[in-house]
Amino acid sequence: MSGLCVVICALIAISAAGEPETASQPPPTGVPMPDFTLFDLEQRPVRLSDLQEPVVVLNFFAFWCDTWIEQLPQLRELAAQQEQMGFQFVSISVDGAWTDQLQEVCGEEGMPVSVIVDKGSRLSSELGLRHIPTIFVLDADRTVRFVYEHHPGNLVLLRAIRAALSASSQASRE
């Protein structure tokens, strides 16, 4: 089931990406993430430029694809470190708000990170996503420092977060 989900996620991401040239290359690093406004599960606007943390991690995922459920323990571990390290982890659903499934899987605890909805997959198409999940690590200037077209595991993500924090710290001293 998980393998089938990965194939379906990849096909949807490729079709949403538009032109074949866009789909043949991963999203680039070293470029600013375009500012965007999406809505959370309570229909409140969330704007990238309003996020205050020096590093932002954007996790594009799909509720119908069971990989997010498999990653939930890792998300809980990362969420516990956000405040101490100075980053914010935001999950972006490319397939809507499946609040019933979210409640069923996460229970009373809820999702350990913020969830916003990319209605119609507009942002993911603009970014040229090819795979779900895709994770972006942004520095304080909201420049894309790292892109992972899968969940690389917490050790790799924490290393990327530390590098982005270091780059942000160096830039603020200059």
Image: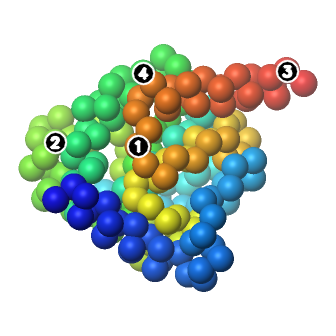
Give 27 or 108, whichever is nearer the viewer: 27
Marks 1 and 4, the one that precedes in the sequence: 4
CA distance for labels 4 and 3: 24 Å
Q: Which residue is mark 1?
A: 151
**Which residue is at a point 18% across and 35% down the rendered structure image?**
109
What amino acid is at disc 3?
Arg
What amino acid is at disc 1?
His
Marks 1 and 3, the one that precedes in the sequence: 1
Residues at circles 1 and 3 in contact by the CB criterion of under 8 Å: no
> In the rendering, which numbered label is found on residue 106?
2
> How many circles with numbers are drawn on the protein?
4
CA distance for labels 1 and 4: 17 Å
Q: Residues within 10 Å of mark 4 (few under 14, many from 20)?
A: some
Residues at circles 2 and 4 in contact by the CB criterion of under 8 Å: no
What amino acid is at disc 4?
Gln
Relative vertical location of residue 27 with respect to residue 86 in this rendering, above or below: below
CA distance for labels 3 and 2: 41 Å
**Which residue is at a point 70% across and 22% down the rendered structure image?**
166
Marks 4 and 3, the one that precedes in the sequence: 4
Residue 5 in the figure: left or right of residue 39: left
Element under label 4? Answer: loop
Marks 2 and 4, the one that precedes in the sequence: 4
Q: Which residue is mark 3?
A: 173
Marks 1 and 2, the one that precedes in the sequence: 2
> In the rendering, which numbered label is found on residue 81?
4
Pinpoint residue 101: horizontal percent, then vertical percent: 14, 56
